Amino acid sequence: MIFYQPVSISKGSFAFCRWSLTAIVWAGFLFQSKALIALSFFLLLFSAILTIKYAPLIQLFTLLEHLLSFPKQIIMLDKKSMRFAHGLGSILSGLCLILLYLDFKFAWECVLVFAIMKSISAFGICPAEKLYNCIHDNNCCSFIRRRQK
């Protein structure tokens, strides 16, 4: 059974997607803007639905690359793990959004945690992608391997 579905996109568009989404979440937190948190939710949701190749921010940067003739470097990503990561991100941002609209006492603190998680992902250490790979490879960490012996 094949779990890895490679998809090629430009390195610049992938970086643009990660960093702009992180900037949107941080701006939402810093300016206490529910609209920016909602924007991050919809961007992540549409990225999960449309897959990484057709994600809104990827498509925007791809258009800019084409119009401005940027040099392209292509990278290969796993379509399923990226879909999982975007889906989990949309769930987390949706949860933050619900807490904000319910005026939960610690809603903005939850947004701060989400912003920190998005920052970690922007640096290329995507916890959700690693979680996906952990689930499908059955070798999550050394702790689990030791317990199975």
Image (tube, rainbow, N blue to C red):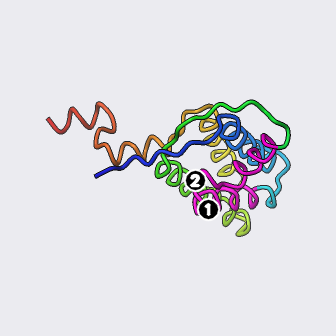
Q: Residue at x 67, y 63 (%)?
A: 99
Kindly identify the amino acid type of the residue bearing the numbered disc 1.
Leu
The vertical placement of 126 against 94, above or below, is above
Other-residue count near label 1 (Cα within 10 Å), few / some / many at <14 / 14–19 / ≥20: some
22 left or right of 49 in image: right
Residue position marked by numbered label 1 in the rendering: 95
- The magenta segment: 37-66
Instruction: Give the alpha-carbon distance from disc 1 to disc 2, as whole Å.
Output: 14 Å
Q: Position of residue 101 (x, y in %)?
A: 73, 68
Can the viewer see residue 106? Answer: no
Residue position marked by numbered label 2 in the rendering: 86
Kindly identify the amino acid type of the residue bearing the numbered disc 2.
His
Within the magenta stretch, is there residue 30? no
Q: Quadrant of the C terminus?
A: top left
Q: Report the front residue among 125 and 67.
A: 67
Q: Report the front residue among 68 and 114.
A: 68
